[in-house]
Amino acid sequence: MGFRRQPQEASGQFTEVGNMRRVAVFMLVCALGVGALGQVTISFWHAMSRALGETLTELVDKFQEENPGIKVDLVYQGGYSALQQKLIAAVAAGEPPILAQQYQNWTTQWLDALVDLDLFLPAEIQADLLPQFDELFEGRMVTVPFNKSILVLYYRPDLVPDPPRTWEEFESIVTAIGKDEEKGVYGTAFRPPNPEIFLTLLYQAGGSILSDDWSEVTINNPAGLEAAEFAARLAQYALLDSAYTSDAIAKGIAIGAFIDTSAGYTYNMNAANAAGVPLAVAPLPCHDGNCASMIQGTNLAVFAPKASRAQIEAAAALIAFLLREDNIVYWAQKTGYLPVTRSAIYGDLWQSYIAGKPAQKVMTDQLIAGGFGQLLHPRYMDMRSLLITYWELLLMGEDTPQAVLDALAAEIDAIK
């Protein structure tokens, strides 16, 4: 299951509305002035910290060296929540950045302020995006993928010689390792702030948050219950901590196998090395042949208000640069994110790299085989907040899985 447009406009009706919007934005851009890419400054708001921010800065510096007439003001805005709030305020004030990272579902908050990137990005780049990243929103390409990760299984080879391939094998391994808090041994680990793990189990069980037309909440149907009961059984043997699992590993806590993102690879491996223990990566356990894994990470969007055509063209040039095979592969190598274009993920640069990197090959295969994205509902972020709350209740065993799901469904129904 991939990204979805708003269902009420999934018919021919959205075409006229979308075309009217894109024409309006295009006319605004033209009216604000056409200039050569000679001397132009663009702002780029992002949420990449530590090594991620350093790598992004390195790439932006390289872009400016290749394009001396373009100056990029790269502005770190804190984490994703802080970035979202600052974007909301900036758009409301009519002063958004030219370019910014954003989750796909944020698009609903400022769709009319975004540039139609298919008007500015070369057609070959648009065609090169992997099909897992269906970036159309109401028929418009207003964002493109950038930093994308996928959920995979991390495991201790000394505790788990053969990584599990199915839910049944996963549960058997977790149960066998058990839970001994005094010795610091756990079969698995869960982070309550990361409900994407539950959503992955939900999708593997054939479930979803909402029906296809968004008219009904379906998270508490039999598929949802199957996923919730499975997670609840695993939770009995799990380390439950809101901190990153890498923190626990670094402290010497032994965890048999756990689900985490590919972007966490460097942190997890560094923690394991610091603790002097082995750690490896395997595909997620599947359920009844369904190997779905939730894609995480943000896209890039260009904002039209007060931006000149020259600035928008400069922003599009930066996007094209970041998506260029050599750059997106370098980004992936340094960060744990994955290439988002066909030419990069199937190209010689990446394929030769992962040939000697088993973990990165697993991540790549996981993305290609079963990657799915967020629900593009206007209230998804609110739904995700509810998911965090009830995911923790489920893991803590505060009530039966059915009761937890029913309460969650009622709250989602009230805001959908």
Image (cartoon, rainbow, N blue to C red):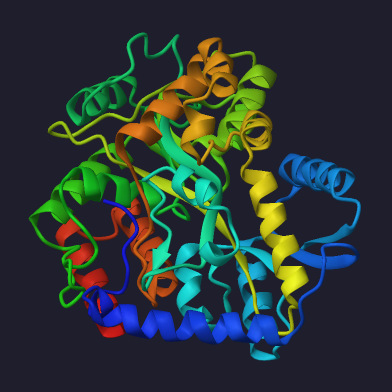
Would residue 109 appear left or right of 206 to someone viewing this image?
Answer: right
Residue 232 visible in the picture: no
The residue lying toward the viewer, choosing from 226 and 152, is: 152
Residue 228 visible in the picture: yes
Would residue 11 appear left or right of 297 to someone viewing this image?
Answer: left
Would residue 8 appear left or right of 283 to someone viewing this image?
Answer: left
Q: Which residue sits at x=90%, y=57%?
A: 69
Q: Which residue sits at x=75%, y=45%?
A: 56
Q: Farthest bottom residue?
A: 93
Q: Which residue sits at x=35%, y=52%?
A: 396
Quarter of the image where one finds residue 108: bottom left
| Residue 334 drawn at (x, y percent) | 69, 31
Quarter of the image where one finds residue 315: bottom right
The vertical placement of 195 against 378, above or below, is above
| Residue 272 drawn at (x, y percent) | 61, 21
| Residue 167 drawn at (x, y percent) | 21, 31
Quarter of the image where one finds residue 217: bottom left
**Quarter of the C terminus within the rendering:** bottom left
The residue lying toward the viewer, choosing from 263 and 341, is: 341
| Residue 344 drawn at (x, y percent) | 54, 32
